[in-house]
Image: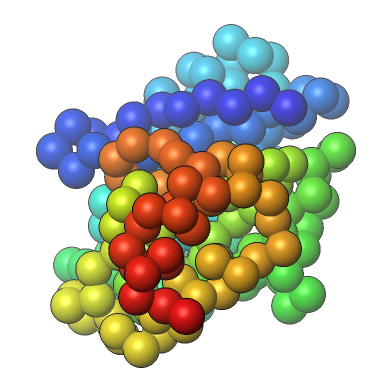
């Protein structure tokens, strides 16, 4: 597996990613940049995009998703709870054939085994995605902080429960965490020092 970080538009600074499998396929996570940036990266690697995973439906995480899915013929995954078609949640069921995340929380692409954790609180449909020692935490968990709960769809009690889940997942401390914004970190560092994991939760 190879991981490529593609920053989204500078104004929002969204972290977006391409993961390349050993067999010439790829997966995109939160493609907020123009679709052409991902298509160029795929062409450079001679890789075929198989799936797009959206950690949630906010506008700053989904900008290139529909165009990329159409251009690459890739499956597009987003929790239906985040399909609203408004300014904050711009995607709707009419935009593309969105797929819900698998009911058993797992999906395999070549050698990569993805596990999806439902982590509402920032949005109703938020997901954190684990694969091969990497945790893509969207806007649920940040380095030293957590996602906002004061926007439409945010629920503080649900965020606390989601952070408790992340704190207690049976994942090692050296699991690398790639948030939707800001610096990358590790799960162990957040368990020890993040006040929303280390101090405020039992």
- At a point 48% along the width and 58% down the height, the residue shown is 191
Work out whether residue 129 or residue 11 is closer to the camera in this orientation and state it: 129
Q: Residue at x 55, y 66 (%)?
A: 166
Nearer the observer, 84 or 202: 202
Residue 87 shows in this picture: yes
Q: Is residue 23 above or below residue 60?
A: above
Q: Position of residue 161 (x, y in %)?
A: 47, 82
- Quarter the N terminus occupies: top right
Quarter of the image where one finds residue 72: top right
Q: Position of residue 198 (x, y in %)?
A: 42, 65
- Residue lying farthest left? 11
Relative placement, left or right, of 79 versus 142 is: right
Say left or right for 141 vs 114.
left
Camera sees residue 65? no
Q: Is residue 139 above or below residue 81?
A: above
Vertical arrangement, residue 116 with respect to residue 149, above or below: above
As drawn, the residue found furthest toward the top would be 44
| Residue 199 relative to residue 78: left or right | left
Task: Tell me: residue 124, above or below residue 69.
Answer: below
Q: Which is nearer the eye, 65 or 17?
A: 17
At x 59%, y 16%, the residue is 43
Q: Position of residue 117 (x, y in %)?
A: 61, 68
Count every numbered label the image shows and give the total: 0
Residue drawn where x is 27% and y is 51% of the image: 60
């Amino acid at each position: 597996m190879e991981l490529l970080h593609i920053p989204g538009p500078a104004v929002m600074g969204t972290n977006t990613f391409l993961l390349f499998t050993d067999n010439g396929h790829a997966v995109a996570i939160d493609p907020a940049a123009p679709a052409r940036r991902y298509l160029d990266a795929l062409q450079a690697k001679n890789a075929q995009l198989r799936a797009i995973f959206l950690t949630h439906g906010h506008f700053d995480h989904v900008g290139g998703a529909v165009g990329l899915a159409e251009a690459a013929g890739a499956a597009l995954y987003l929790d239906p709870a985040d399909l609203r078609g408004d300014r904050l949640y711009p995607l709707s069921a009419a935009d593309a054939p969105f797929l819900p995340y698998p009911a058993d929380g797992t999906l395999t692409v070549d050698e990569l085994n993805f596990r999806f954790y439902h982590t509402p609180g920032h949005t109703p449909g938020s997901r954190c995605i684990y694969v091969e020692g990497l945790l893509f935490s969207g806007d649920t968990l940040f380095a030293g902080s957590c996602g906002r709960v004061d926007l439409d769809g945010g629920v503080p009690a649900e965020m606390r429960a989601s952070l408790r889940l992340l704190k207690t997942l049976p994942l090692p401390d050296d699991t690398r965490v790639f948030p939707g914004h800001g610096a990358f970190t590790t799960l162990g560092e957040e368990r020890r020092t993040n006040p929303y994991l280390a101090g405020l939760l039992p």
